[in-house]
Image: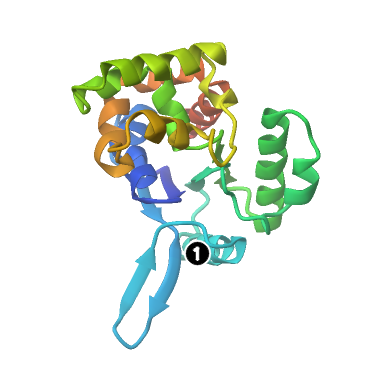
Amino acid sequence: MTRLNVLAEGYTERDFAEKLLAPYVDPQGRQVFARCVTTGRDHRKGRMYRGGLPNYGKVKADLTRWLKECPGRDVYFSTMFDYYALPTDFPGYDEAMRKADAYERVLFLEDAFAKDVGDPRLIPYIQLHEFEALLFVAPHELSWTYIESENAIENLEAVAQSFGNRPEKIDNGPDTAPSKRILKEIPEYDKVAAGVDTLELVGIDTLKEACPHFSEWVEKLVRIFV
């Protein structure tokens, strides 16, 4: 039976994979599983720490463990990492940064990542430019959580329009990354509290229409369950 394991950068990405992505790519069953990157272990207390991408070494070590735990040819793996603040020791990072187009950079990084891991079951995905870019597909849906933010949401919609309603193009500057733009307008914005619930209102199909790189990833995942 086909199975998909998704290694997520943080808890919001994990929840997105489990609650929204899973029923879309695998509508017939429950064979999509997600977990956050293991970033540390306390062997004395028997604790495991997850979430975030401190460096590529942590990512590869955790993914390699999971690959070995699930050796079957019908078990596939994917990732959901932000391009924004991606660790600079990621495979191909320096060469990717020399490319002018963001789509070319992220495709180059995904390809270098796959080659470094060396397992054909891996379908790598790096989100342009971060998870919050998806919220710019339909900023008005944030009003269900942030009720008195009408002007702020109008400003966010103006940002989306300025990028041709292609949220993946919203850049990754320290002050202009998607999350920074949202926080500027809605200081109380909380990714964990609002992120997945808002995108559930938007829907995967609408996200795909506005985000071609995201769409390509989702279609690859759909095909493994066909």
Q: Would you identify the image quadrant in which residue 170 lies?
A: top right
- Residue 144 location in percent, x, y? 20, 22
Q: Is residue 186 visible?
A: yes
Q: Judge whether 54 appears above or below 216 on screen.
A: below
Q: Secondary structure at mark 1?
A: helix
Q: Label 1 is placed on what type of residue?
A: Asp
- Residue 51 location in percent, x, y? 40, 58
State left or right for residue 95 relative to residue 84: right
Q: Judge whether 44 appears above or below 153 on screen.
A: below
Q: Residue at x 71, y 51 (%)?
A: 115
Of all residues, the one furthest to the bottom in this rendering is 44
Q: Residue at x 54, y 33 (%)?
A: 176
Q: Is residue 226 visible?
A: no
- Residue 175 location in percent, x, y? 53, 37
Find disc 1 in the rendering and name its residue.
Answer: 62
Q: Residue at x 48, y 33 (%)?
A: 221
**Quadrant where the image shows the C terminus:** top left
- Residue 139 location in percent, x, y? 36, 19
State left or right for residue 6 relative to residue 203: right
Q: Judge whether 134 appears above or below 35 on screen.
A: above
Q: Nearer the viewer, residue 185 or 129?
A: 185
Marker count (numbered):
1
- Visual colour scheme: rainbow
Q: Judge whether 60 appears above or below 47 on screen.
A: above
Q: Nearer the viewer, residue 18 or 157?
A: 157
Q: Would you identify the image quadrant in which residue 216 lies?
A: top right
